[in-house]
Image: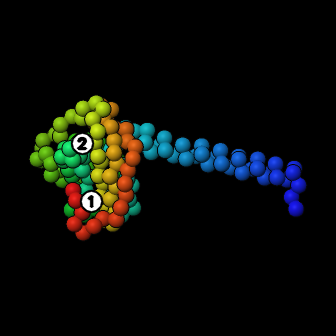
Amino acid sequence: MVGNEGKRWLFGVVAAVGVILAMLGYAYWTLVYVDESNLLTFLSPEGIRSFTVLDSRKTTVWFIEAPSPERLSAIRYGEVPPGFVQRLPTVGTRPRAFVRDEVLTLRAEAVTRYQEHQCTANGEASVSCGFYVQSPTARTSPR
């Protein structure tokens, strides 16, 4: 049997580990999301096939895709990453600027999964994101 002193020690260790894990989680979150101009919030080891920005009416504002999945760590609004082709707006045309406080959906699609992230525009090309959904990619997934 563990005495009161042992229980207090164990509680202290568990609490300390919990605080350390919370701090590490916050540090990771800060490192990943501190760059509000990086629209890619979904990292996939299999690579990204397409990326779409939708407005609050679910109208496509910007759409890029790759002939084969590309491993990316960042996507900047209006800047087409190497290996991708812009489909909307037409090639060579910059997408319109975001309107501050505009609600947007960012959709990143990989080979087997996709993520839709609900975001709010902070400026012409930056966002803050909150709620997201991840799901397996269907053969006829909506764009």
Can residue 25 be seen here? The reply is: yes
For discs 1 and 2, the disc positioned in front in the rendered view:
2
Nearest the eye: 78 or 22: 22
Residue at the disc numbered 2: 56
Look at the image and tell me in which quarter the C terminus lies: bottom left
Q: CA distance from mark 1 to mark 2?
A: 23 Å
> Where in the figure is residue 62, as x and y percent of width and height?
20, 46
Residue density around tag 2, few if under 14, some if 14–19, many if 20 or more, within 10 Å: few
83 over 54 or under it: above or below: below
Look at the image and tell me in which quarter the N terminus lies: bottom right
Q: Residue at (29%, 39%) from the top-left corner? A: 103
Q: Is residue 142 left or right of residue 10?
A: left
Asked where in the image residue 79 lies, by quadrant, the reply is: top left
Nearest the eye: 94 or 58: 58
Residue at the disc numbered 1: 49
Residue density around tag 1, few if under 14, some if 14–19, many if 20 or more, within 10 Å: many
Q: Residue at (24%, 42%) from the top-left corner? A: 56
